[in-house]
Image (spheres, rainbow, N blue to C red):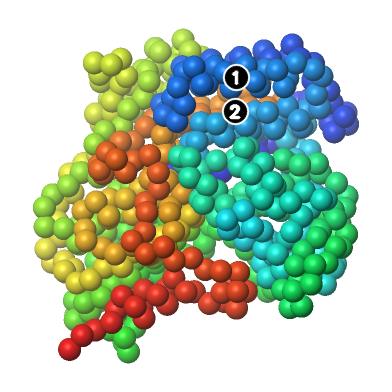
């Protein structure tokens, strides 16, 4: 399923009206909900101990309980739960404010910048403030807190799949977890911020006060100033073109579903067929597959692409497992989830259950090579920290089964320790914070030693702030100019 991060739950159930900003939670209430979350994670999360031992998790929970041992504002408790989820290093897990607290965060003002973060440095890409700060300027500090300290603190509250940090730095620059709206969550939300920056044009160090703005003001100003709004989720799921002059094909896939998960299974196979028919007709021997910022979707749609590059049958996913069946989940979380009937669960020797019904989860099926229009030329795959969920697993199987050259930066993850197929939501009984837990794990059919982090490129190439503000794509340039050199 597509990775959808940091969506705030705004439930419509009735709740007393009061000033939520000043709501204070008592230690007993917070610690009871922390215990509820801890128990649910241990009982249901498929990868709770992937990046920590049970002993380490227990120590961390003790630390969080200590933080919650005094009365705290509701927003502060939410930050504690964010740290709990970030500790798992699974991006399909989440922490969510709801009811009145959810409305507080929905209406909370944000920093007036879109940023680019790299190596704990923060650069302004778009400036929606009323201050004349040039695009490309580097933020040195916010309210006297240095940029590297800011990024380090952000990474305690938000994490990518695994323990690599480059993917999370990438995500702080895009709409899902944009720095503009997550900074006031992790740090204090204020009417104004003191920004010290290095001016992109003059190289001078300047300090200015900028006002926070609402989401509506942010969107309106950005559209007026830049003629577009930055969105990670692209309108077009895929694109294809052939460069007649350089004799190479360019295939861009921004997600592995076009319009919905219920769309016809033939959607991507039909698109690929059209592309590779044209490639063969025109005798193209060089192909760039651009999977940067791919949001995910169905891994089977990545597998259908791989069919054009292989000569043997393959199965992209070894197995999909979950911790229990309907009876187990009814006992542990109070919901059967209809897993037995939907997925044909079968008990494993270790007590977990595996999916045997592949009608819906087609990534468990065997995929045959496509002989007609099969491609035997040179393949270049472009990746970055925005390639997540199936968007990260897709490059992983391409790397496993082909000799494609990978250019860019490490992906957000391969498949994490959970997937987005099914989630459960555990709601605090005494606080207005909930957590979401993925209930299934996909064991992607790649080398065992490559599963705990994202796909790594053969050539580490990243755009700099200078490239970004000048609208230059050096990753694509490198692919074309360096790796498509033709020898007579």
State the image coordinates of residue 236 (x, y, percent, origin top left). Answer: 47, 65
Residue 99, percent from left and from top: 73, 30
Crowd rating for badge 2 (residues with CA inside 10 Å; few <14, some 14–19, many 20+): many
Residue 302 is at least partly visible in this image: yes
Q: Residue 263: x percent and y percent?
A: 38, 51
Q: Is 174 situated above or below 44?
A: below
Q: Is residue 282 visible?
A: no
Q: Residue at x 51, y 51 (%)?
A: 166
The crowding category of the residue bearing disc 1, from other C-alpha atoms within 10 Å (few below 14, some 14 to 19, many at least 20), is: some
Q: Do the numbered discs 2 and 1 sit on residues whose CB atoms are within 8 Å?
A: yes
Q: Quadrant of residue 350?
A: top left
Residue matched to label 2: 84
Q: Is residue 470 above or below residue 95?
A: below
Q: CA distance from mark 2 to mark 1?
A: 8 Å
Q: SS class of the residue under badge 2?
A: helix
Q: Is residue 400 above or below residue 463?
A: above
Q: Which mark is residue 165?
A: none
118 left or right of 346? right
> Considering only order in the chain, which callout, 1 or 2, is on the residue closer to the N terminus?
1
| Quadrant into which the C terminus falls | bottom left
Q: Looking at the image, which is closer to me, 350 or 147? A: 147
Which quarter of the figure is the N terminus placed in? top left
Query: What label does residue 61 carry, if any?
Result: 1
Q: Give whichever of 397, 239 is nearer the camera.
A: 397
| Nearer to us in this view, 197 or 221 | 197
């Amino acid at each position: 399923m597509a990775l959808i991060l940091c969506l705030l739950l705004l439930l419509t159930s009735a709740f007393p009206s009061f000033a939520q900003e000043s709501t204070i939670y008592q230690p007993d209430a917070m610690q009871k909900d922390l215990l509820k979350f801890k128990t649910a994670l241990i009982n249901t999360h498929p990868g709770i101990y992937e990046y920590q031992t049970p002993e380490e998790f227990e120590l961390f929970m003790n630390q969080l309980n200590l933080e919650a041992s005094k009365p705290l504002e509701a927003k502060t408790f939410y930050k504690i739960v964010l740290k709990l989820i970030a500790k798992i290093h699974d991006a399909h897990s989440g922490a969510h404010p709801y009811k009145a607290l959810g409305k507080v965060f929905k209406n909370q003002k944000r920093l007036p910048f879109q940023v680019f973060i790299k190596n704990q440095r923060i650069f302004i890409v778009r400036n929606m403030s009323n201050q004349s700060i040039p695009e490309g300027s580097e933020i040195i500090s916010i309210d006297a807190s240095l940029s590297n300290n800011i990024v380090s603190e952000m990474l305690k509250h938000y994490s990518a799949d695994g323990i690599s940090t480059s993917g999370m730095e990438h995500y702080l620059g895009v709409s899902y977890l944009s720095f503009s709206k997550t900074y006031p969550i992790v740090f204090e939300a204020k009417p104004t911020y003191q920004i010290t920056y290095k001016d992109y044009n003059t190289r001078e160090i300047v300090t200015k006060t900028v006002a926070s703005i609402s989401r509506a003001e942010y969107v309106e100003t950005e559209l007026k100033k830049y003629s577009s709004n930055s969105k990670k989720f692209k309108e077009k799921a895929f694109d294809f073109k052939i460069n007649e002059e350089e004799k190479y094909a360019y295939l861009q896939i921004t997600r592995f579903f076009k319009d919905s998960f219920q769309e016809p299974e033939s959607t991507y196979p039909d698109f690929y067929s059209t592309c590779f028919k044209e490639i063969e007709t025109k005798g193209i021997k060089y192909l760039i597959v651009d999977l940067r910022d791919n949001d995910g979707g169905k891994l089977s749609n990545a597998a259908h692409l791989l069919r054009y590059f292989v000569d043997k049958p393959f199965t992209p996913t070894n197995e999909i497992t979950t911790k229990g069946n309907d009876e187990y989940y009814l006992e542990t979380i109070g919901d059967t989830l209809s897993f037995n009937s939907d997925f044909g669960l079968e008990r494993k020797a270790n007590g977990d259950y595996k999916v045997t019904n592949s009608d819906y989860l087609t990534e468990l099926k065997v995929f045959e090579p496509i002989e007609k229009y099969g491609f035997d030329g040179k393949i270049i795959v472009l990746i970055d920290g925005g390639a997540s969920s199936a968007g990260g697993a897709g490059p992983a199987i391409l790397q496993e089964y082909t000799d494609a050259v990978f250019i860019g930066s490490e992906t957000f993850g391969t498949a994490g320790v959970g997937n987005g197929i099914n989630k459960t939501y555990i709601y605090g009984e005494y606080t207005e914070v909930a957590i979401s837990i993925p209930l299934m794990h996909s064991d992607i059919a790649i080398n065992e030693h490559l599963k705990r982090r994202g796909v790594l490129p053969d050539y580490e190439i990243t755009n700099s702030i200078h490239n970004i503000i000048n609208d230059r794509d050096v990753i694509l340039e490198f692919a074309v100019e360096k790796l498509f050199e033709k020898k007579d």
